[in-house]
């Protein structure tokens, strides 16, 4: 969840105690990695999320969004960052989507039944979809989890091999007035067992994320006091987890998502700030048991624009290709600064600059890289929200001007894309009609300048992504 206040109405104490006393199913059997295990053929990643813009206006959508990535760090939003499915019952919107591959190889999507930020809306249900391939979503329904007069926030699931069932965990308020992690068990995500308390450390916790069976240990990451921390247990039994880790945060951080690299022994932890249009931050470790994480350089990862509270799963190369074929990559790009990776190229009052994301309007940072107006082998930057305007240099500063159709304008608005001057995996842009000059930022303002020093090469290097 995001931007949530202190927990709301409490359930009745009698009902809560009855839930806590519910007899669990058999807890015998060998545990497995379950949902946290990648299929042997998996080679890419999929992210689910909803979107919120800074002003909760344009770019805000409480439907199911997906993005794909070959490395789990830089993401391509599908369907132009528009929703692929939208709830048709309950609050008619979702937050906190979660995506998991089931034991039969198909997928299930869970999400909070809540549209927007009406925190007084308390749903006993969560949204559920089935999907064979993430190209179609079927069987939409709501799954009832409890009878309390409180919420069912941030549902996630994992396979409990000992029970032979899926565990659905989520946040609800207990009789003492604070959030705990609850659990219900299900075989089909159509009906579920009576709820039980899964994790209650005696203080407010939300956003549980499970990693099952790593070296015989299970890890539960969650939000505590605006910080991401973890508990662990050698069992999956409710009540068996104990907090142990060093917390990480970047301001107020929530919505932990932990997954393992398919290419190395690296684990990643993603979390986002809980303001509208919050920013994702990422950490890494090679040892979950250590309980310590190292922050990733923001150069290495890029979230889908406006994305909030994500879930990440692995997919096969074929699924990755099929998703792009079905939904398409965006028709626009964003450009991230190399030496100020929290900043993106945007126009403000028609002047070109780099500013820290997020900002209004986010569409100010979206560009169509079209064939160069003066040379089709080069590129021109067409504004998405002012499509008659292009970036051009004027007295060496870049600004957004209407294409007047002249050859002079076309030349000023055309740039040759080259390997990044500071990193060949990124990009730099050389002026067409001033070929000794490159687009660079100076005091955050974009201009074209000769480039010679290491700092200038960094100023002139950008990542073209989404």
Image (spheres, rainbow, N blue to C red):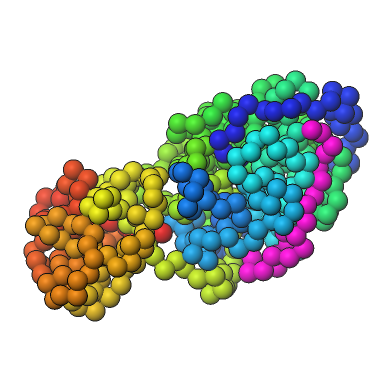
* Residue in view at x 79 percent, y 36 percent: 237
Residue 7 point in image, percent of width and height: 67, 28
Left or right of 313? Residue 389 is left
Q: Which image quadrant is residue 206 in?
A: top right
Above or below: residue 177 compared with residue 310: above
Q: Which residues fall within the magenta stretch? A: 129-149
Above or below: residue 178 compared with residue 57: above
**Quadrant where the N terminus lies?**
top right
Residue 144 part of the magenta-drawn span = yes
Q: Nearer the viewer, residue 117 or 169?
A: 117
Q: Which image quadrant is residue 397 in?
A: bottom left
Residue 371 in view of the camera: yes
* Residue in view at x 39 percent, y 56 percent: 363
Residue 62 point in image, percent of width and height: 60, 51
* Residue in view at x 11 percent, y 50 percent: 453
Above or below: residue 89 compared with residue 257: below
Residue 423 point in image, percent of width and height: 26, 57
Left or right of 397? Residue 30 is right
């Amino acid at each position: 969840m995001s931007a949530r206040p202190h927990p709301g109405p409490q359930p009745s104490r009698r009902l809560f105690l009855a839930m806590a006393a519910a007899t669990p199913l058999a807890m015998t059997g060998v545990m497995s990695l379950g949902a946290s295990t990648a299929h042997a053929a998996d080679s890419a990643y999929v992210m689910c999320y909803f979107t919120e813009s800074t002003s909760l206006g344009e770019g805000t959508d409480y439907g199911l969004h997906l993005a794909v990535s070959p490395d789990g760090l830089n993401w391509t939003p599908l369907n132009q960052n528009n929703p692929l499915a939208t709830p048709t019952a309950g609050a008619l919107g979702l937050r906190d989507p979660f995506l998991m591959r089931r034991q039969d190889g198909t997928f299930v999507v869970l999400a909070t039944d809540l549209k927007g930020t009406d925190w007084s809306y308390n749903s006993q249900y969560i949204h559920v979809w089935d999907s064979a391939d993430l190209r179609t979503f079927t069987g939409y329904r709501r799954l009832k989890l409890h009878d309390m007069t409180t919420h069912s926030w941030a549902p996630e699931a994992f396979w409990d091999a000992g029970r032979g069932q899926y565990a659905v965990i989520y946040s609800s308020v207990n009789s003492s007035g604070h959030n705990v992690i609850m659990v219900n068990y299900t075989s089909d995500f159509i009906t579920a067992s009576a709820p039980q308390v899964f994790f209650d450390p005696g203080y407010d916790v939300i956003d549980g994320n499970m990693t099952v069976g790593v070296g015989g240990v299970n890890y539960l990451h969650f939000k505590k006091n605006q910080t991401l921390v973890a508990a662990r247990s050698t069992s999956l039994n409710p009540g068996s987890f104990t907090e142990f880790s060093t917390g990480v945060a970047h301001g107020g951080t929530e919505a932990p998502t932990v997954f393992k690299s398919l290419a190395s022994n690296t684990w990643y932890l993603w979390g986002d700030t809980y303001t509208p249009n919050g920013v994702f931050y990422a950490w890494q470790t090679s040892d979950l048991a250590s309980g310590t994480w190292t922050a990733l350089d923001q150069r290495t990862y890029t979230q889908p624009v406006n994305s909030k509270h994500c879930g990440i799963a692995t997919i096969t190369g074929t699924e990755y290709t099929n998703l792009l074929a079905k939904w398409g990559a965006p028709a626009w790009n964003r450009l991230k600064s190399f030496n100020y990776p929290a900043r993106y190229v945007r126009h403000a009052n028609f002047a070109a600059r780099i500013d820290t994301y997020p900002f209004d309007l986010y569409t100010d940072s979206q560009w169509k890289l079209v064939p160069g107006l003066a040379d089709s082998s080069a590129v021109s930057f067409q504004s998405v929200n002012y499509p008659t305007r292009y970036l051009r240099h004027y007295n060496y500063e870049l600004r957004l001007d209407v294409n007047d159709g002249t050859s002079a304008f076309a030349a000023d608005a055309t740039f040759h894309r080259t390997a990044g001057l500071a990193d060949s995996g990124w990009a730099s842009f050389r002026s067409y009609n001033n070929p000794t000059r490159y687009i660079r930022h100076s005091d955050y303002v974009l201009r074209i300048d000769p480039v010679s020093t290491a700092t200038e090469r960094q100023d002139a290097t950008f990542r073209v992504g989404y």
